[in-house]
Every structure is written in structure tokens, then in C-alpha cells.
Amino acid sequence: MAKKKRTFSKFRSKWWSLCEIDRQIRRGRACTCRSLSRDLEVDPRTVRRYIAFMRDEMDAPIEYDPIEETYALTDHTWTMPNVHLAEAELVALAVATRSMAAAMPAPFTERLEGLLAKLLDALPQAQREELRLLQERVDFVPSPVSSKGQELVEPLVEAIRDERTIEMTYRTLRRDREDRRRVDPYCLRFFAGAWYMVGYDHLTKHFPVFNLARVRTLEVTQETYHRKKFSAAEYFRHAVGVTVGGPPRSVRVLLSGRAARTAGERIWPGGFTYTPGDNGTGVLAGQVSKLDDLIAWVAAVGGDATILSDGLPPTKVPPHPC
């Protein structure tokens, strides 16, 4: 007996295409049948069929301009039909909303709360109250000291999405002065209560890390850039936090006291392994390109710690107060 052919993958491909059409038109770009067919990798006839389906079956207010040959939404309050979420998925989203609020800038937190509210509106009253009560019972404490620059995250996310060059005034600590910089932003990283950006700097022709707290002015230009080969995972591969540069070197961290006793309770940075000793101490070993963030990170672990690194004298880190 022949196996029945599964059609889910075909449906999923069509659904993704409909979502991509909605996303591009909603962003206000000049969407034409030709541009959509190129981006979706389908023929123009298929694009017209997709848009007709969205109009007729999903009541999408899509209007066609025969002069400009572009598509546009006439009502931006219209949204794609909701995807069904299981109860466990809604619980995860509710808890995640609280956890992200400790680190995310206000605009994103508010939108995430709005998304959760839309999903909860489709549930019975009892389930809505249960999830809201759960949110109150799961608490996340943010970093005690946060840096400035959160207000720049949203425009930078849009610049990264649209691949647009930014112009900014940036204070460099090493020179202790403010300079004008043109940068192609590639990624953002949140670490220890501060936001950082990695981008291609037109001045140095490299990919430095910029602390958003030191950005004095920022403008997203209309100039687009073509992404160079870049991997954030590879860029930060040998970094405990955000300090990068130079070849990786082996590092050993001797832990004692409370830090050694609680070592089994911790998840260490990627690539690091912990080996307990016989005398109430233990050794954490891994590779880093620079010690700056490691020193600060070890200090926050609690208990005495001595950093041992090839070619460097031992670095004593004072215990973090309980």
C-alpha cells in the first residue's frame, strides 16, 4: 500500500510566503510583483495568486497601484490570523515576558506585553487570570547597575534589519575624546547590565565593539550597506563578555571557599570546564582572548579566586561580598 504523501511542508511553505508578503508590504517598501517574486523565489503568477488569496480568504486590505505597480496596506490595524499556541507555549511566553523585562528597553517590553495580551484575549477568563497570576509569582531581578544607551537599541535594531549605515558621535575611553563615526551595525549584545554594538567601522576598517552608553548622538542614514562575512558566535567565541581581540590563550582559575563549594551549582561560560580538587578548591579552565571581562566575572562569582594564565603573573581577585 502506497504511503500517503504529506502536504504539511507545502502548506508551511505557502504560509511563510504569505507572512513574508505581509511583512514587506507592512514595512512600507515599494513592493512590486517582480520584487516579491524575486524575494520569495517564485514566479509572478504565484505572487498574484498569493495576494488574491490574502484578499479573498483573509480579508487583507491590500491595494494595488497600477501606475507605480506597487502593493500597499490601506489599514495597518489588520493582522495575519493568530497561530494556535498550546498552554505550555503560552506559559513559556508569559514567563519569558517577565524575564526579558529585566534587560530589554521599554519599547520592546511594551510590545511583548501587548503581544501576550492579544494572545490571552483569546482564552477563557479563568485561564487568563491563571497566567497573569503566574507572571506575578515568577520574578526576575535585573542587574543592580545598568548603563545608559537603552533608548538607542530600537533604532539600531531597525538599522540592522534594514542594513542601513549609522552616523554617531562616540566617546573613546583610550583617547578620552568624542569622534564622529560611520558604522554599519551588525549585531547587539547585552552583558552585565550594558548594551553593546558590533559593526563595521568605516574609519578603522575593522569590527570594534561600541558601548552604547558612550554614544552621544546617533542618526540612522538612508544609505544601505552590503553585509560582509561576519558571525557573532565566532566573533565572541573566546570572550566571556564583550572584550575581544588577539589570539585565544589558555586560562586557569583557581576557586576556593564559597566559590568552590557552589561551583557545581553554576553553568560556566561556553568552552570552560570545572575540575574539583581534593582540598576544598577547584580549577576552572578555558580559553579567552582577553582577561578584562574574566577578571570582572570571577570577582562576581563569590569567594576567593586566583586567575592563572600562561605568560602572566597570577591575578588575585577579591571575593564578592555576600
Image: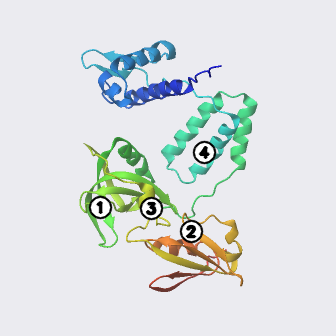
Badge 3: how crowded within 10 Å, few (<14), some, or many (20+)?
some
Q: Is residue 181 left or right of residue 147?
A: left
Residue contact between numbered discs 4 and 3, judged by CB atoms under 8 Å: no
Residue 55 in the image: x percent, y percent?
45, 15
Residue 133 in the image: x percent, y percent?
73, 42
Name the residue beneath numbered marker 3: 236
Q: Nearer the viewer, residue 37 or 85?
A: 37
The residue type indicated by label 2 comes to Phe
Based on the displayed image, in which of its 4 quarters is residue 31 positioned? top left
* Mark closer to the observer (4, 3): 3
**Which residue is at 34% across, 25% downward?**
37
The residue type indicated by label 3 comes to Phe
**Which residue is at 62% across, 48% downward?**
98
**Which residue is at 52% across, 50% downward?**
104
Residue contact between numbered discs 2 and 3, judged by CB atoms under 8 Å: no
First-in-chain label (2 vs 3) = 3
Residue 97 is labelled as 4
How far apart marks 1 and 3 lie (CA) works out to 15 Å
Q: Report the residue that reaches farthest toward the top.
A: 56
Name the residue beneath numbered marker 2: 272
How far apart marks 1 and 2 lie (CA) works out to 28 Å
The residue type indicated by label 4 comes to Thr
* Mark closer to the observer (1, 4): 1
Name the residue beneath numbered marker 1: 206
